[in-house]
Every structure is written in C-alpha cells, then in structure tokens.
Image (tube, grey):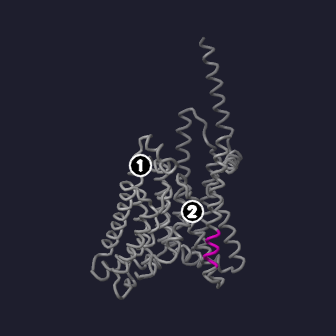
Amino acid sequence: MNQDTKQPTALLDRSDVRVSHDTGIAATIRSSIDKVRSGDLGSLPVVVGLVIIWTVFGTLNPTFLSSSNLANLLFDASTVGIISLGIVCVLMVGEIDLSVGSISGFASAMVGMLWVNEGWPVALAILAALVFGGVIGIIYALLFNRLGMPSFVSTLAGLLAVLGMQLYLLGATGSINLPYGSGLVNFGQLLVIPRPLAYVLALVPGAVMLFTGFSMVRRRQQANLSTPSVGGLVAKAVAITVALEFVAFYLNQDRGIPWMFALFVVLVIIMDYALTRTQWGRSMSAVGGNREAARRAGINVRMIYTSAFVLCAMFAALGGVLAAARLASASQQAGTGDVNLNAIAAAVIGGTSLFGGRGNAYSALLGIIVIQSIASGLTMLDLSSALRYMITGAVLAIAVIVDSLARRSRASHGRG
C-alpha cells in the first residue's frame, strides 16, 4: 500500500521536474507567440507602430532622431502623459472623463493665482490644485454612484463648468506669467538627470525584474509548482538593461533625460504596481469586466468607481501644473485644444481597452510617445497640423480595431 502511494508521488515529482526544466528562452518565445495567437497582444501593436513612425520620420528628416529632439519630445510628452495616466484608471472601469483638459487648465490657473497673485508658497499652491482635482473627482463619483448619471454626461458638464471657472479665475488679463528662474519653471523647462545618475537609474528596472522574478521562482518551487524560465527571466532583464543604458547614453549626448519625464515614469511604475499587484487593482479589472459579478464577489463597487474618478481628476490637475511650468504661464488656452483628445487617445493607442477591464499604466507612456512623435515629426517636416489630426485619428481608429479584434480572438479562444 505504501509502495502504491509512493509511486504516483514519485512520478508527480519527476513530472514537476520535467515541467520546470522544460523551460528556457525558446520556451519563453513560444509562450509569447501563444499569447499573441490567443488575442493577448499586450504592447506589441503600439511598439511596432512606434518603430514604423520613428523609421519613417527618421528617414525623411534625420534630425528627428537626434538626442536633442528626443529630449524635447520627452519634455512635451510628460504633461499630457500624466493626464493620460488618469484616463487609464477610468477606462479600466469602463467609464470616461471628458473634462481632464479643463481640470488641467484650471489647476494651472489656480497655481498661478495663488502663487503669483496671492503670494502663497508654490508647494501649497500645487497642493491646493491637487485637492481641487480630488474634489471634482468625488463629485463625478457621487453623480455616478448615487444618481446614476452617465460619466459621459457628468464629465461633459464638468468640462464646461470648470472651463468657465478657469476663465473667471484668470480675469480680464487672460494669463498669469510664472517667475522665470523659479524651481517649478526650471523643472518644466531645463532640469535633467545628471549623467552618472542616469546610468545608475537605468540599471534599476532590470535589477528589480531579477529580484521579483527570482522571488516568484523560489515561492513556486517551495509550493512544488512548475516555475517560469530562469533563462528567459535573465534574458529579459539583460535586454531591458541594455536598452535603457543605450537610451541614457544617447540622450546624454545632448541635454539628457528630463526630470519631468522621470517623474512621469515613476508615476507609471507606481500605478502599474497598484493595478497589477494589489487587491485594488484586481478589483478595478473585475469591475470593468463585469460590474454585477464584481459586486456579488464582495467588491465595494462604488468605492472602486470613486477611486478611479478621483485619481483621474488629480492626475489631470498635476498634468496642468506641469504644463504651466513647461510654458512658464497659466493662460486661457491651457487645457483647451487637443489636450482632452490626446490624453484619451494616448491611453487607447497604448493598449487600454475602451470596453473596460483591460489596460495598464504603461499604456499612457507608450501612447503619448506615439502621439508626440507624430506631432514632432510633422512639425519638423513643416507640415500642417491638419495632417497631424488626421494621422492621429487614423492611429486611434486602428488601435480600437485591433482591440476589438483581440477581444473577439480571446472570446473564440476561450470557447475553444
């Protein structure tokens, strides 16, 4: 009896060993191919699109890929990128915020008025702008949770109301100049990461990937579960490290990496961890995928919606403050124009689903780099902004089509 019970165990152990060792770089590649075939495209489409865009513009005008132009591109991408990071949150739960442009514009006006006109410390003025964004998000959440008002309607009303507040705050002059040489303006226009520090920071993502990956492997081995490829993990970490070190080296040939872009990346990393490694992030995906099922599973659906709207509005306010720092002024034009559309388009182009339940923080980073690359490339070719709108619209349409086809592929794969 003991021999009978031991034999299957031994076989199981050998099977575990076989599964564990039947992994490597080739297995990692096969796993990635299987994910693509099942409709889990991840960031692949936007990365391919970005390579095509950079190749085309770099061929037409070699200056496009110069370290100086790429540094300016990162400066310009940071402000709307942070706003887009908030859009990712509301899209994750299947909702939308059309007022992020107005909120960013009012936040910039609020900082200008409190800091320049009223003499507040700049840190306190920025904090007040962020609190204002949070209050607006709470109002949207109350209208949605308590009254059932669609987010499309409530945020459209907010767009108009907050825009009116911005115009009222700026008064007859229509603009407030921020002090040149101040820390905030220097942060938005000049400050870059020191070169030695940039090379050190480029090592961090790969090191973190190795640490978390080996920790996961150890936990799965202790639980007698099959483990992912150690070789594949090391290969990914090395590839990322080499790529980031090259980026740091290339950008350091001119101005360097902007601190403002570094702030954007840090916020992306924090939000990525929150969305993928916390109970709150899993609840966001669950609510966006099926609200009723999430409620029956014990998730506080109202609180999840509230957190999404509040985060979106606060990111919009922060993006507005940084936009004011970039331009050294707060004006009636701040937050208007294509800020709204670019923030939403960046999230969708980057891979966040308009249908809710799928998305990640890196969508904002990839999407805004695509949009800003198109804008920068066309400007350097001296082409009209009309063409920029048409190309951006086409890229957005393609992104939504790819998302729809991927959803259909995942559904058919699941049935199969």
Residues under labels 2 and 1: Cα distance?
23 Å
Comes first in the chain, label 2 or label 1: 1
Binning the other alpha carbons within 10 Å of mark 2 as few (below 14), some (14 to 19) or many (20 upward) gives many
- Does residue 128 sit above or below 214 in this rendering? below
Task: Look at mark 1 in the image and give the residue it sits on.
Answer: 301
- In this image, 303 relative to 201: left or right? left
Tell me which segment is drawn in magenta.
387-394
- Does residue 344 sit above or below 214 in this rendering? below
Q: Quadrant of the C terminus?
A: top right
Task: Look at mark 2 in the image and give the residue it sits on.
Answer: 348
Q: Please tell me whether mark 2 sits on a helix, a strand or a loop.
A: helix
Q: Is any part of residue 154 visible from this angle? A: yes
Q: Going 67% across and 65% down the picture, which residue do you hit?
A: 49
Q: Going 46% across and 63% down the picture, which residue do you hit?
A: 152
Q: Position of residue 65 (x, y in %)?
A: 65, 76
Amino acid at the residue labelled 1 = Val
